[in-house]
Amino acid sequence: MSPNPLAMVDQAIDLQLSQLSTSFRFILDVTPTDADDVKDSFLAGDIAEPEFTYRDYIIEPEVLHTVLHSIDVSRVQDTTVAALLRNKHRELDLQLSMLRCRGAKDFCNLSIELFGGVHQDLLTAAESILARVEPHAWSGERLDAEQFLALANEEIDYYRSLEPDVDIHAEINPDSTGVMVSGNVLLIGPEASVSADRANALIQHEVGTHLVTQVNGSHQPLQVMGTGLAGYDETQEGLAVLAELACGELTSSRLRQLAGRVLTVSRMLNGATFRECWEQLVQEGFRPGGAFSTVMRIFRSGGLTKDACYLRGLLDLLGHLRGGGELEAFFLGKFALEDLPLIEELNARGVLSAPVVLPRWYDDEATRGRLVEAASITDPTELIQGVAA
């Protein structure tokens, strides 16, 4: 391994921020532990407005806040790295502040500051998708948690065949619902059920994008590129949905789901209740259970606006490709599209290392052809053309 080109003080502060960001589980900590039970009661009509239960913190946010405030990012010597680490410090401050007020009104206000709200152009795109893309229920065979875990392990084994030291794995976790990545682990809820027709798309989303960029980022001299630079969520989720499109599996149902998330965030911010948001999605063609899960994700902990970033990130990356941009740099680690010039500058100076592995979904001529075709599309309702529903 080549020596780290960064100054010792820069490495130390990068390491401190990276370690701090892995000492808590933000998404897990703001996600209910009883979502499935509450859903059953809600759909049965036993409760009008759901209340959720959350897990205890491993470390109290106040303690982590104290640690964060002891990290002096003003000491960073490299000006480009300093800009990136200052923004990461601020993001961690916002995340810990959100954890400190989980369930309170301030949580949503901080979420808007961290993840943004819904601007009119995004809202218009989401409304157009729901109005013009017909609902198409996922049907046929479904995979349970064990079956999906087997598929995930096959994909992880593929990357290990390319690079034996790839440090990622998948597990069924009783504290999880659905499928999500936390750090270098793919967490699968024991009750997870995945449509067989969507399984590969989900594998490419979670393993082929989130875990692959974690591997590549963790091998960078700038360690926080593995845990994620400030604002990386939007671009990461956009890239992961782009992976679904690239492998030919961005379905009408999936595109409607992303649009439904945007509209639900907008409705919540405009004062709609949980039930009102749920009823509107059902009226728009969503299955009651799926509509509940969408609304739960957005109302959790007091109002999490993160889910609007999937469609926003996808449209922004398509715009990037349309303007002649490329995707290779995004496999260096986890960072936001707006930080691409800083990342490219570090890369040009030889500060960054080449990716350890490239996503399987990208390293294929057919998938690149789909990306070229998608980049020429300006109407988001046309993104599913040529893709089986």
Image (spheres, rainbow, N blue to C red):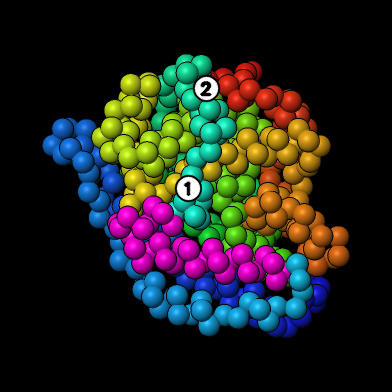
In the image, the segment drawn in magenta is 81-110
Q: Quadrant of the N terminus?
A: bottom right
**Residue 89 percent across, percent down from the top left:** 57, 69
Q: Nearer the viewer, residue 100 or 162?
A: 100
Q: Is residue 209 visible?
A: no
Q: How many marks?
A: 2
Please name the residue shown 38% across and 36% down the image.
267
Q: Residues within 10 Å of mark 2 (few under 14, many from 20)?
A: some
Q: Residue at x 60, y 60 (%)?
A: 230
**In the image, is residue 82 part of the stretch drawn in magenta?**
yes
Residue 85 lies in quadrant: bottom right
Q: In the visual, does 364 lie left or right of 131?
A: right
Cβ–Cβ below 8 Å for labels 1 and 2?
A: no
Please name whichever residue, 223 or 10, is drawn nearer the observer in this view of the structure: 10
Residue 385 appears in which quarter of the rendering? top right
Circle 2: element type: helix
Q: Which residue is tagged 1?
A: 306
Question: Does any portion of residue 82 appear in the rendered image?
Answer: yes
Main secondary structure found in the magenta portion: helix
In the image, what residue type sits under mark 1?
Lys
Residue 240 forms part of the magenta stretch:
no
What is the three-letter code of the residue carrying label 2?
Ser
Residue linked to disc 2: 128
Above or below, 243 relative to 125:
below
